[in-house]
Amino acid sequence: MLTRELLAIPMPAGQRLDINSGVARLSGSIWAALWRDDRQSPTTAVLIVHPASNFLGHYALRDLASRGVAAVGLCTRYVGNDSALIMENCVLDIGAAIAHLRGLGYAEVVLVGNSGGGGLAALYQEQAEHPTITETPAGDPVDLTGLPPADRIVMAMAHPGRATVYTEGLDPAITDETRPFDRDLALDMFAHGPTFDAEFLDRYRAAQIARNERITGWVDDQLAGLAAHGREGRHGEKTGPDDLPFVVHGTAADPRFTDLAVDPSDRRPGTLWGDPWTANFQPASLGHLTSLRSWLSQWSYTRSRANAYRCLAGVAAPVLVVYGSADCAAFPSHAKGMYDAVTHDRRALVEITGADHYFQGTPELAAEMCDHIVEWSP
């Protein structure tokens, strides 16, 4: 019989906790759902992670548990709200979860980075094996030593990292961040598409990176200027903001959304939010609302550390990459790039034909992914 248990995992202390909910701040816990078959005694836990998504109800948990493992869906401290998310704190949350699972008696932990969890899982394992990070990209101290390594890593329907996929969708036709509809038509995929030649794509990709780097430079300037707005408190202490929110328009302008010849696959045109032009400005689609510190850690192309292309090169644990041929969010080049980044031969690359990002209407394909995760051994 399959059962579900809610795990209250002690939250790592001493780090920034920029979330509005007092209940969440004061609980001292992050949360996870653990599914298992009570007729068995699993010794392996499969931990599925993402920086901000609520994985308590992840679609793979039942299927994994029915295959004889403990299946765990983790929520980081930023569940449901990534506007002030710091990737390094998410790494600490994963470390707390793995330590908790080891304390429950699970001898092996398989870390699954799903979707936007790919870059995070790769960063976690790199730092667990070879800790080097002592501060966030904004300069806040963080201690990533002593993280318990996972035994195996899976990149499941994953892209290499939020900053990478975000920049691939960043609209370069926006040259004034306050006026998203005053557009540079020479760099407007919606004016040139739906198909694109190589010359346009080269200019477009370079302009996307340039826009990301312009925002990063602006963020650095804003952080440097915040000290000027401090005030003296009642007891002589310095008070004042050390972070600010801001808006980024145009984050769903990847040419792959309209031109299926760019990174060919079985996908249909469009985004996870439907029409690309609408998704490009929809507030709830990727990364429109952020803070200065979060930008550097989560979205900056040059400063974010959660990049599987870079991190997997330093990972000694076995790595499985599973991708769907019809996925419109994590593309074949992402999967192959992550596979190629692994520097040892304990790796595997698996395509699930016909699978989209969430296995909508195809539970048998989700079950196939779970088979690969449970049965794969290097």
Image (tube, rainbow, N blue to C red):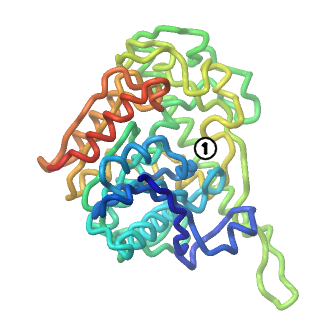
* Residue 215 versus residue 92 in the image, above or below: above
Q: Is residue 73 above or below residue 178?
A: below
Name the residue rendered at 45%, 71% in the picture. 96
Q: Residue furthest left?
A: 345
Name the outermost residue toward the bottom: 235
Which image quadrant for residue 228? Answer: bottom right
Q: Secondary structure at mark 1?
A: helix
In this figure, which residue is indicated by the disc labeled 1? Answer: 215
Q: Amino acid at mark 1?
A: Ile
Q: Residue at x 39, y 67 (%)?
A: 98
Residue 165 location, x and y as percent?
Answer: 47, 36
200 displayed left or right of 325:
right
Q: Position of residue 278 (x, y in %)?
A: 68, 22
Quadrant of the rendered image containing residue 341:
top left
- Place of residue 239 in the rendered image (x, y in percent of width and height, measured from the top left): 78, 77
Instruction: Please tell me which residue lies in front, 88 or 151.
Output: 151
- For residue 268, side relative to residue 107 (left or right): right
Foreground residue among 75 and 44: 44
Residue at (68% x, 37% y) in the render = 284
Please say if 236 is above or below 327: below
- Direction from residue 51 to residue 158 in the image, left or right: left
Q: How many marks?
A: 1
325 is higher (above) or lower (below) than 12:
above
Residue 140 rendering spot, x and y as whole percentages: 55, 70
